[in-house]
Image (spheres, rainbow, N blue to C red):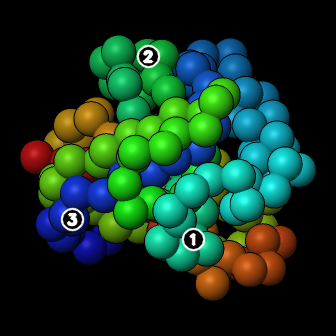
């Protein structure tokens, strides 16, 4: 676990409002990933900075047990042109703990790492957290992703 400061950046993508209660998020976020991967979002989102995919968790109503919004998309240069049926978000500068997860990213590697994070005694802010799927996630069944958790 590494603690670092992140500058602001913007993401455009598709979103879902969900909760971790009754494993609803597993279903909702899985369906969101399915939609994202099947609709060639890279060609639909303007001003993309690179091919890294972001999964952003934001608009928490409390802690990780309360409803929140998940956005899957790409980092963009600006939010000037947000396509219909998509959302744009500016992630504000903040302090984050960085975690690495390895293994089958399409199965339980990411979910298991989030389980570990939620069990940790860290001072989360529940503002905006995100995952990054870059070149090391090119083979998602044996890949690596970064998880950034906003902290005080």
Mark 1–mark 2 Cα distance, whole angstroms, equals: 28 Å
Residue 108's place in the image compared with 105, above or below, is above
Residue depicted at x 63% and y 84%: 135
Q: Earlier in the sequence, mark 2 or mark 3?
A: 3
Q: Which residue is mark 3?
A: 6
- Furthest toward the left, the residue is 152
In this view, the residue in front, 102 or 67, is 67
- Along the horizontal axis of the image, is 42 left or right of 19? right
Mark 2–mark 3 Cα distance, whole angstroms, equals: 25 Å
- Furthest toward the right, the residue is 38
Q: Earlier in the sequence, mark 3 or mark 1?
A: 3
Q: Which residue is mark 2?
A: 66
Count of picture labels: 3
Q: Earlier in the sequence, mark 1 or mark 2?
A: 1
Q: The N terminus appears in which quarter of the rendering?
A: bottom left
2 or 3: mark nearer the eye:
3
Mark 3–mark 1 Cα distance, whole angstroms, equals: 16 Å
Q: Kindly indicate whether the residue at mark 1 contacts the one at mark 3 (C-beta within 8 angstroms).
A: no
Asked if residue 56 can be seen in this view, the reply is: no
Residue depicted at x 39% and y 46%: 79
């Amino acid at each position: 676990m590494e603690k670092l400061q992140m500058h602001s950046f913007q993401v455009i993508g598709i979103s879902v409002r969900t909760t971790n209660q009754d494993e609803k998020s597993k279903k909702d976020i899985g369906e969101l990933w399915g939609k994202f991967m099947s609709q060639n979002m890279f060609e639909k989102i303007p001003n993309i900075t690179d091919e890294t995919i972001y999964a952003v968790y934001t608009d928490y109503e409390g802690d990780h047990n309360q409803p929140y919004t998940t956005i899957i998309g790409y980092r963009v240069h600006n939010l000037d042109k947000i396509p219909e049926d998509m959302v744009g978000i500016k992630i504000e500068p903040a302090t984050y703990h960085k975690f690495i997860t390895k293994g089958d990213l399409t199965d339980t590697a990411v979910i298991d790492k989030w389980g570990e994070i939620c069990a940790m005694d860290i001072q989360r802010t529940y503002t905006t957290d995100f995952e990054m799927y870059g070149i090391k996630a090119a083979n998602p069944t044996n890949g690596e992703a970064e998880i950034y958790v906003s902290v005080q």
